Amino acid sequence: MQIAILTLEGFNELDSFLALALLNRARAEGVTAVLAGPQRHVTSMNGVPVEIQADLGQLAAADGVIVASGTQTREFAADPEFIQALPLDPSRQLIAGQCSGALLLAKKGLLHGIAITSDSKTKPWLEALGQTVVERPLLVSGNIATAGGCLASQYLCTWLLLRTIGRQGALSALAQVAPVGESPAYEKRLLAVAQAADPSLGQ
């Protein structure tokens, strides 16, 4: 089970690194997360240089894709060749847009007719495309999810883990990162947000 995190020049560290670290806590359950993108090397919004682990071909082969945000997302969204080259298929993949990552999904035509969420800066850009943007940390429609706010990445990862390896596997991974002394309450909140966003997960 591979999750690819689309990570572009100017990427937001919280989006890409938090998801990378949290999802890879489920390696024992067969989950592997990698940073993917069209460029071999990218620099984060705060100047951290990173070597990308997978190309767009591997993005196409992934079971799930997180489209992370960054300071240059709008420029990438305005490039029709880049949008066309994105190999995203919600009929066989779990697809997630984190903050401004939703802008790329919208330009790809994957968010038509569904309510979504995003950060406050990206919201007007999405509304200009005709999207309905709701102030929620996580929204899910079928195999497509959107998350709003950098730290909503933890809810997005919880949703991906629940959909791919189930409740026990997700809890095992989350327990490894929970604040000491707050583990039960922390895990309960993450599960509650994910389940509220995707009723198919049950309680």
Image: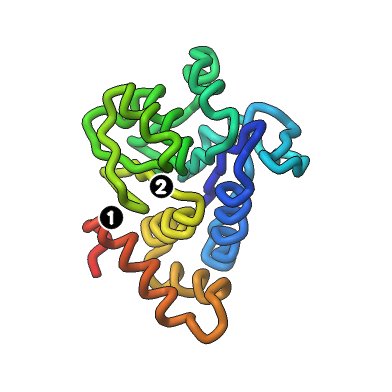
Q: Position of residue 18 (x, y in %)?
A: 58, 56
Q: Quadrant of the C terminus?
A: bottom left
Local SS, label 2: loop
Q: Residues within 10 Å of mark 2 (few under 14, many from 20)?
A: many
Amino acid beneath label 1: Ala
Q: Which mark is drawn over residue 166?
A: none
Direction from residue 201 to residue 18 in the image, left or right: right
The residue to which callout 1 is attached is: 197
Amino acid beneath label 2: Gly
Q: Position of residue 139 (x, y in %)?
A: 31, 48
**Vertical relation: 118 (above or below) 129:** below
Q: Are dots 1 and 2 in contact, CB under 8 Å? A: no
Q: Residues within 10 Å of mark 1 (few under 14, many from 20)?
A: many
Local SS, label 1: helix
**Vertical relation: 133 (above or below) 176:** above
Mark 1 or 2: the one toward you? 2
Direction from residue 58 to residue 41 in the image, left or right: right
Q: Quadrant of residue 202?
A: bottom left
Residue drawn at point x = 53 percent, y = 38 percent = 69
Q: Quadrant of residue 126?
A: top left
The residue to which callout 2 is attached is: 148
Direction from residue 70 to residue 109 in the image, left or right: left
Q: Position of residue 120 (x, y in %)?
A: 41, 41
